[in-house]
Amino acid sequence: MNERITEALERSNKWWKEEYEIEFKDREIYEHIKEFIEKRQILALVGLRRTGKTTIMQKIILDSLKEFGKRNVVYFSFDDFREVRLLEVIKSYESIMNKKISEGKYLFLFDEIQKVDHWEEQLKRFYDENPRIKFIISGSESLFLRKNIRESLAGRMYEFNIRTLSFKEFLLFKGKKYDNLNLYKEELLKDLRSYLYSNGFPEIINESKEISEKYLKENVIEKILYKDIPQIVSIRDPSLLEQIFNIILNDPGQLINFDDLARDLGISRQTASIYISYLEKAFLIRKIYNYSRNTRKTQKGMKKYYPIVLPIGLIDKKESFGKVFETFIINQLQGEFFWRDTFKNEIDLVLQNPVIGMEIKSGEIKEKDLVPLQKFSEKFNPKYKIIISYNLESKINGVDIVPFYKYLLRGESRAKKGR
């Protein structure tokens, strides 16, 4: 039996010997995950580093101890065990407990599983051979970076993206509850600034701007670009990956032409395309499509790219705050579509089911700003047309102008319908 594995199992499964308690603040995603706990399929928690995947696993453990039994719930992190196979962990557990996993009902939680070579093949075999074991896995950003992993586990897995805190969750984590949004307008605007500095990462919501900047650079961005992605896929030059990321980071929402990008960086179009796909799969950037009723046309058209993590340096610059605010809203609403026609009429965001045309404005709003929305309306007849503002509330020519905090905190249900 591998002593390192045994020690790690005994150290990280405290509920085997003692009462188990954790501090957990409600996350919107957790209620959704709970609906799938009793399903046969594997649950995969994916997302950026430090967004709370392990904490959610701990909450699942706490809520599952009674159903499975304390010593039938097994957690293991592969963070320092890249060379270990899943079978070794399971055999070590069986030896400690003098059990056989073929007998009984078990919950296995494997954290940072993407660090293990060919983890998907090993997990698939255990899943198929042990119908009474529930598997929950997690992976920081690169869980599905390699090709065909999703396909190999098709039908066997449900995937959940654990994102940074939403603005609503951020306020709850800070212990703030405003019973009158009109009355607390100034406080909410300050809260937005604080949220933007933390980028919604739970560990730094109470930290200074300087500490947050260092944390994001060293614990999130650099580790993903120079450690996580190169460990999973072949990257000849990680600094090139960083260059492409910085182009999107410092100019959010730009239309990217792969031919132009490749020429500017002195690389092939294929390399540019592959590196951008890695950044997407690592959850560092978001791609949104030009909206059309024709799916093929949507897929073929040029795309816009936004960073998921905003640089703090842009937040305090007055001239760039409009882009920062636009990126914030796009990410809060998990935007998938914008709209732009051949005459360069353009709106920032299109939500679906029902169709909502949305402009995002951080400053003054004039009647001419409504023209793209009107053009979009003539073509697609959306159910709603709306402008999300920083702090303005009004109505112009039948278009509602709503401050972001009212839309995000009161209009949550409408926003979700459009995702």
Image (cartoon, rainbow, N blue to C red):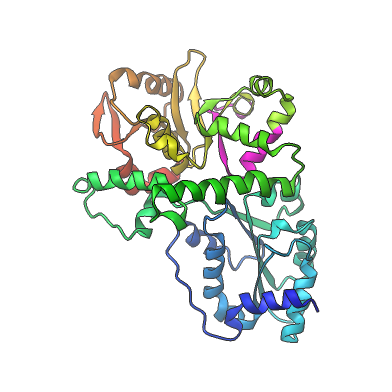
Using the rendered view, name the quadrant where residue 135 is placed. Answer: bottom right
Closer to the camera, 418 or 176?
A: 176
Q: Is residue 14 above or below residue 118?
A: below
The structure residue drawn at horizontal position 32% and vertical position 48%, both measured from the top left corner, is 191
Closer to the camera, 79 or 328?
A: 79
Q: Is residue 159 above or below residue 110?
A: above
The structure residue drawn at horizontal position 64% and vertical position 43%, both measured from the top left corner, is 225
Instruction: State left or right for residue 292 relative to residue 181.
Output: right
Using the rendered view, name the quadrant where residue 106 is placed. Answer: bottom right
- Estimate the x, y position of residue 80 in percent, counting from the top left: 70, 64
Return the residue found at the far top: 343
The structure residue drawn at horizontal position 75% and vertical position 87%, both measured from the top left corner, is 98
Instruction: State left or right for residue 213 relative to residue 235.
Output: left
Using the rendered view, name the quadrant where residue 3 is placed. Answer: bottom right
Viewport quadrant of the N terminus: bottom right
Q: Is residue 291 magenta?
A: yes
- Residue 359 visible (yes or no): no
- Residue 273 visible (yes or no): yes
Q: Is residue 88 magenta?
A: no
- Estimate the x, y position of residue 385 in percent, counting from the top left: 36, 30
The structure residue drawn at horizontal position 73% and vertical position 70%, both measured from the top left corner, is 131
Question: What is the magenta range?
Answer: 274-296
Closer to the camera, 281 or 209?
A: 209
**Count of picture labels:** 0
